[in-house]
Image: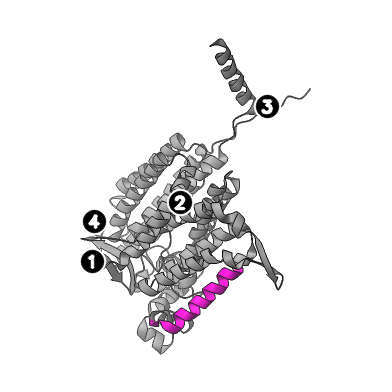
């Protein structure tokens, strides 16, 4: 006689702890290596900074054990490693520019990292079930579009490097589009869950491709026009591409129709061509992309050329941390931090970083597949795709696969807005994965509870 018994799955928290210690150890080793390469000694504040970073990571791990026991065990170690490597490279560029730890960008980035982890912790406490977010579908959509419009306000709006995507309040500046990305993902997920049946209805079939009905094209046309508005008024090619690509990807996940991808690509090509014909800044980006080393391009900007030459100098294994000259490239700690890693860690180190991004996106998509509700599936898939698209746009821009867009590498580049938004994104993915991996109550336990409740009612 065989006996069938239920086995509770492992939470994975011990695995997460081991990987987390390994991630912090790699960051500490990179920091020590940087100090030995630049000054010949271990950095004086290594113990305090290392223990502080380890403490922040362990505190978040303890919160996961308490509030999200079955969350994916790989997300936190991957993000901790990426964030730490970004801090090391930013500090390395500070050293090259004659700044120490007290007045450099790295200390500010470390403070933003601690604040981002604190906000991610608060998200886990406040959002106890990701399905609660569905109640605020339209509020999230309205707030997201308001945040997109904030940089256009005459008093607080601020233009930097040709793009009007910042708001400035006194000495503080913030990029509201990073938060808008999360709110619009919530809005798209809630909206598409309600309307996916109508959007899935087949229309005419052309060249073997089943197209949607003409009356169902309204949402994608509105998203296309909104993305064009961001490109025209804020001159932000990266955010425009990110928001439109996010909507098209979530639309495909909701309906499982390839025709939406074809329509989205057609609209994107048409919009890009119109923008190239009408706007000078788009023509400049295309010139730098196609003719990077031409006299006209170098006269306009040699940033991309310097980044490419830096990666070429790194070769396969790199010059070593502290041995290159990434500081020669403008914005080496933000927009061009990928070439900075490519120069000092080489192609092998850069590919290792890209593998970390691939694993991060893969775990997010795995969470989407395992989630048992439609809203959670769409939200996890949308957040994961936004990370993947942002990484592709950043890496593709600095390697001349596509034109430069101005987006920054998640968790690596300097900037408080990006860190806050991306750590919050990971917190939402952790909450969804906790729901997806949490075991269902055993049927016999449910029956026993129901029988006990019935007996109580009879006794009363």
The residue at the point 45 percent across, 44 percent down is: 21
Query: Between residues 460 and 427, which one lies in front from this camera angle?
Result: 460
Query: Between residues 144 and 410, which one lies in front from this camera angle?
Result: 144
Label 1 crowd (10 A; few <14 / some 14-19 / many >=20):
few
What whole-number distance in Å separates the C-alpha atoms at marks 4 and 2? 43 Å
Residue extending farthest bottom: 295
Q: Which residue position holds label 1?
A: 155
Say whether marks 3 and 1 touch (CB < 8 Å): no
Q: Which residue position holds label 2?
A: 137
Q: From what the image shows, is residue 174 above or below residue 292?
A: above
Mark 3 or 4, nearer chain start? 3
Label 2 crowd (10 A; few <14 / some 14-19 / many >=20):
some
Q: Which residue position holds label 3?
A: 5
Q: Tell me where residue 260 appears, x and y as whole percent.
A: 60, 65
Disc 2, SS: helix
Front position among marks 4 and 2: 2
Res 170 quadrant in image: bottom left
Front position among marks 4 and 1: 1
Mark 2 or 3, nearer chain start? 3
Disc 1, SS: loop
Front position among marks 3 and 1: 1
Q: Tell me where residue 321 appears, x and y as whole percent.
A: 40, 62
What whole-number distance in Å separates the C-alpha atoms at marks 3 and 4? 59 Å
Mark 2 or 1, nearer chain start? 2
Q: Which mark is residue 102?
A: 4
Front position among marks 2 and 3: 2
What whole-number distance in Å separates the C-alpha atoms at marks 2 and 3? 41 Å
What whole-number distance in Å separates the C-alpha atoms at marks 4 and 1? 32 Å
Q: Tell me which colouring the rendered structure shows.
A: one colour
- Magenta span of residues: 262-280
């Amino acid at each position: 006689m065989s006996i069938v018994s239920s086995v509770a799955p492992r939470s994975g928290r011990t695995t997460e702890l081991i990987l987390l210690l390994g991630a912090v150890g790699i960051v500490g080793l990179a920091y020590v290596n940087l100090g030995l390469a630049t000054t010949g000694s271990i950095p004086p504040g290594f113990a305090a900074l290392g223990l502080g970073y380890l403490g922040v990571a362990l505190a978040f791990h303890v919160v996961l054990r308490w509030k999200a026991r079955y969350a994916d065990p790989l997300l936190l170690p991957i993000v901790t490693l990426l964030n730490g490597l970004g801090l090391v490279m930013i500090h390395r560029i500070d050293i090259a520019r004659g700044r120490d730890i007290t007045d450099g960008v790295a200390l500010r980035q470390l403070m933003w990292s601690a604040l981002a982890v604190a906000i991610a912790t608060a998200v886990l406490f406040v959002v106890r079930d990701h399905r609660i977010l569905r109640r605020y579908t339209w509020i999230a959509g309205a707030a997201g579009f308001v945040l997109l419009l904030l940089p256009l306000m005459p008093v607080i709006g601020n233009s930097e490097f040709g793009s009007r995507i910042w708001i400035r309040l006194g000495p503080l500046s913030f990029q509201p589009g990073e938060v808008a990305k999360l709110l619009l993902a919530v809005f798209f997920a809630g909206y598409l869950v309600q309307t996916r049946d109508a959007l899935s209805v087949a229309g005419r079939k052309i060249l073997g491709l089943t197209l949607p009905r003409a009356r169902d094209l309204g949402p994608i046309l509105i998203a296309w026009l909104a993305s064009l508005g961001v490109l025209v008024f804020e001159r932000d090619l990266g955010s425009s591409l990110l928001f439109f690509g996010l909507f098209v990807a979530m639309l495909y996940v909701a309906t499982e129709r390839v025709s939406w991808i074809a329509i989205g690509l057609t609209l994107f090509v048409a919009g890009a061509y119109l923008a190239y014909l009408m706007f000078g800044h788009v023509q400049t980006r295309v010139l730098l992309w196609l003719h990077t080393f031409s006299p006209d391009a170098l006269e306009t900007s040699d940033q991309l050329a310097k980044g490419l030459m830096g990666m070429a100098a790194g070769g396969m294994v790199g010059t070593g941390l502290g041995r290159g000259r990434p500081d020669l490239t403008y914005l080496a700690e933000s927009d061009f931090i990928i070439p900075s890693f490519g120069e000092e860690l080489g192609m092998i180190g850069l590919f290792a970083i890209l593998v970390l991004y691939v694993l991060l996106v893969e775990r997010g998509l795995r969470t989407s597949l395992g989630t048992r509700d439609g809203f959670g599936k769409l939200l996890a898939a949308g957040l994961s795709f936004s990370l993947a698209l942002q990484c592709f746009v950043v890496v593709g821009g600095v390697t001349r696969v596509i034109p430069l867009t101005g987006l920054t590498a998640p968790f690596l580049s300097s900037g408080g807005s990006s860190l806050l938004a991306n750590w919050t994104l990971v917190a939402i993915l952790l909450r969804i994965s906790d729901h997806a991996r949490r075991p269902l109550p055993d049927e016999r336990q449910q029956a026993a509870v129901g029988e006990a409740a019935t007996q109580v009612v009879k006794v009363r």
